[in-house]
Image (cartoon, grey):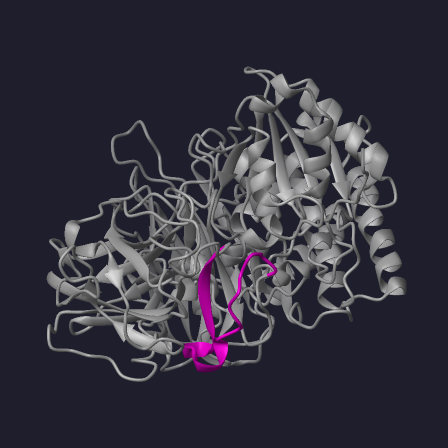
Amino acid sequence: MRIIVLTTALTCCLGFFIKAQDTEPVHDQNSSNLIYVEKDGIVAIEAEDFYKQTSSGKRKWYITSKDKSPAVTPDKDNNHSEGASNHAYIEILPDTRSTHEDILMKGENFSDQPGVLGIVHYKVKFNTTGRFYVWVRAFSTGSEDNGIHVGINDDWPEHGQRMQWCEGKNDWTWESRQRTKEVHCGLAHQIYLDIDQPGIHDIQFSMREDGFEFDKFILTRDIHYRPEGNGPDSVNYWKNPSLRVEEKVSKRSYISQLATSSADTKTFFAKELPVQAQGFYKDTLGDWLAINPEHGKEAQVSMPFYFSSGRYDILFVGVGENDGQSNYVLTVNDRVLGGFTPPLAKEVFEQGPDYNQLFENISLSKGDVITLKAKLGSADGQEWARGRWSGIVFVPAGKGMTLQNMFPGKHKISEPVKVAPPAGRLAIVADGNSPDPDDLGGTAVSLALVRATLLNDRLVHYSHSCDLVRSNRISEQAEIERHALMQTACDVTARRWGGFDHLKFYDALWEQEESVNSLTKAINESSKNNPLWIVEAGEPDIIGFALEASQKNKRQFVKVITHHSANDDAGDYYTWQQILDFGVEEVRIPDQNVFLKVDLELWDWAKNHSDPRVQWVWLMGKIAEVDDVVKFQKGKWDCSDAGMVLYWISGATSGGLELGSIEDVKKLLLDYID
């Protein structure tokens, strides 16, 4: 048995550049979270910005850019990115039939039936209904690499089938023709999709002929429209609106948005105030202070005003609750500024201007004591509100009303992330010895999450440094340093958080045989009621070796969680398809970089926390940020691979959190610490 090393690609970041680039270069946009918007009857989309691909067992779409070409054979074509829009395109490979003389293999290198082979997906929000004509920009070099199908929402209508190119060989060419028995080069105006309802639809393209090179497509209501050159820019996109605060992109809390709205804003964050013996507790669901009605119905907290003396507008930032209306009174020294009772919320929790109270033109001196008193209310006498509030914001007098109205609307607060793991055990295979250092933070967060949710006894395997062939983008000396850092991230996090005495953390490259044996043992202990969930946080080779060495009848009980094709396709010994061919279940979730690769300051809560366990987690991500091998982590704190652990903790395929955030990580860790 060949033994090789594991690589934890807790990275897979947006600017990702590791060995996986040789097979599938990654672009800078977060395609998994892009939704393109049709505006005024037209939308243009770069082909390489698909958010996922399916039915890719026999043929798969690969991205080609001006710097990299897929290392997939056979592929007789040269790199054609020079004339491509955005200097990148996708091609479906391998290409075994480019001319009529090549052997035709239906269901493999040719599919006249749409929706069967090699499907790429794009999310498009349509504001207009009606018939949209489809134009595609393609590069064809032969007679058998010039056809594709288009569909919508897993439906493949007749007028989306058999798009055909005859003209414009050896050049990027726009076309919108449908091949028929009578007219092989196709009829104009016959490729279209009918949009019956506005909203988000899944636009899909599937392979007709392998080797098809796909640059861009346009959907237009204008039957007479004909694109020229590169076509219109693909700029009409928005971030996925399925966020926690109505259709806002920001994952920051409402109080944080107010606090950072201008340079002269000063803020008392409720979550940072002392609460001992004053009746409040810290509610980490929303970073609020709250009152437990079983312990009392009133509470107060006082804090010195330590900002510069002057006249201020003071904004009390409350929380609307649906089970009662609490009352709040704000005083400065012994002077009562006023009271406030927010309205009853329709949702469980809501925030926004309706739940705030503005006190204008208040004279404050440094050292004044500001006190907030809260008294609980109940809508029915049985269920009580908890007097939740998130902070007090100070701005120069005259600016308070602007601040109050800066973020209008009601900001719904999500339900807390649930801890509901599926049956079975967890194994994690990570890299970290590859150029991208994000596995340092990812490892620390993953282990802390498993411990914080009391699932540490279900973690049965952890190996790191699974990149078995060193990339020339990291020196031998730097890689040795990474091995040491990854081992430290594992051992120190485990010791400080506790509960991992049963586990040995393997260096997959330096302890390859032991790593494979450990994972093989975990696979062989699997059953229907006790499956093994493997988190693929790096190259798949260690997983492949373990599966190859395992008992065949046990592989059906293995589920492999992945969130990025850059990991899947980075193997030196196993392709992703070979992993799936062992009979394991693929569990694919969206790219976790979306909300888990964030600006460094969004982790200040951990940096400044009093508990050394939390500080240690922050330190691991900070070490990755100052790494001198790559530059794309600068200013970022990245624990993207830990999103797969968060997904497993919260239910996996039974409603698990597919796009976890830093707030979710924070709540789970601090709930445990508190």
x, y percent for residue 155: 22, 45
Residue range of the region highlighted in magenta in the rendering:
71-93
Q: Residue at x 87, y 40 (%)?
A: 511
Would you identify the image quadrant in which residue 577 lies? top right
Determine whether, in the image, residue 579 is placed left or right of residue 108. right
Q: Residue at x 38, y 49 (%)?
A: 413
Q: Residue at x 82, y 28 (%)?
A: 501
Of the 4 image quadrants, the one containing the C terminus is top right
Determine whether, in the image, residue 611 is placed left or right of residue 405. right
Of the 4 image quadrants, the one containing the N terminus is top right
Name above or below for residue 477 compared with residue 344.
below
Q: Quick check: is 533 in the magenta stretch?
A: no
Q: Nearer the viewer, residue 181 or 125?
A: 181
x, y percent for residue 85: 41, 78
Q: Nearer the viewer, residue 71 or 391?
A: 71
x, y percent for residue 206: 34, 52
Residue 275 seen by the camera: no
Q: Quick check: is 76 in the magenta stretch?
A: yes
